[in-house]
Image: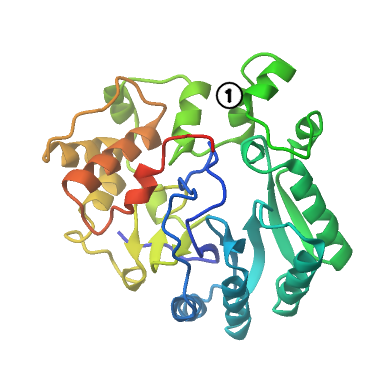
Amino acid sequence: MKIGPIHSMGVIVNYKCSAKCRHCCYSSSPGWPGDYMSVETAGRVFSWMKSRRVRSCHIGGGEPFLRPEALLSICSLAKEHGIGIEYIETNASWHILEEKTVSLLRQLLKVGVDCLLISVDPFHNEFIPYSKQKELIRLCRKEGMGTFIWPGNFGGDLELLDTSVPHPIKEFDALFGGDYQSDAARSYGLNCNGRAISLCRGAYVQKRPGDIAGENGPCTCLTSTGHCHLDLYENYIPPVCTGFTIALADVDGVLDREKYPALYAAYERGPAGLWDYAKGFGFTPSRERYVNRCDLCFDLKRFLLQNHPTADIGYPSYFSQSDYERG
């Protein structure tokens, strides 16, 4: 098992966030530790990327702007290493005073950052008023900072309610009728990981775990690199697969089967392989039905972390912060 060629990737500078959104695949929240990528770690990450001929990356979290000075240092270091920053993800919660926001945008432009991905959707809107995001977009355009609105199809809905305050998603149910939450989840195209699993359960038909295990083959996506990440703990996160981690030092070679047993089980035989592996330590499904292979796999990884932790399963907060509570 070997990770494939990487052309672009994400750098997760923190997992702590100002919001606890229903749809977050990484279960980010205020409840995570306040750790942030150090300059030393960033230097090793960017040096590794350069050695791999990775020319650009995006910066994500958590909420990267929780520590703006640290973020600026990391972006400056990327520039020194010749690594382009495609965009920085943000929920705009940090924007309070125009003067401070403009100053930060100008500093980012000086270190080579020319685009922010600004999250605009009903899940963020439960915590962050749309007016903040609109104002940040306005200031970005004024200062010459590009914006990438993600996912881009919810702004019209958010305009129908008071944009100066957050709104529980049930208010959209009342406004539009039906099950707006599930409709929004399907429209978003969520990956069924982390806290998003609870949201997906209401949006999609669920199946018995045995059927899911029998219908799905190897998880070859674990070696693909389409939307992979490196995080502040110097771990590689496979694309759209919360809960598996690979040490950066191991990414360049063939992975050690003894060090990464759960990863190999999923890679070679999919959820059935991971289930057989976990059964050896007493696993039984915690629910009668699951949405898909990723939902079942997340439950398997949660069990393994609690009962037989290995280097390929991390972190506790992925699982302890995966339940949704507003506020």
Residue 50 versus residue 148 in the image, above or below = below
x, y percent for residue 250? 31, 70
Identify the residue at the far top of this view. 178
* Amino acid at circle 1: Ser
Direction from residue 144 to residue 285 in the image, left or right: left
Would you say residue 272 is visible in this rendering? Answer: yes
x, y percent for residue 298? 34, 39
Query: The residue tagged with tag 1: helix, strand or loop?
Result: helix
Direction from residue 325 to residue 130 in the image, left or right: right
179 or 244: which is nearer to us?
179
Within the image, what quadrant is residue 34 found in? bottom left
275 or 321: which is nearer to us?
321
Residue 136 versus residue 107 in the image, above or below = above
160 or 201: which is nearer to us?
160
**Identity of the residue drawn at 74% across and 79% down:** 110
**Identity of the residue drawn at 64% across and 31% down:** 187
Q: Where's the C terminus, which quadrant? A: top right
Within the image, what quadrant is residue 279 found in? top left
Q: How many marks?
A: 1
Identify the residue at the far right of this view. 142
Residue 17 versus residue 59 in the image, above or below = above
x, y percent for residue 289? 34, 21
Residue under label 1, please give it. 182
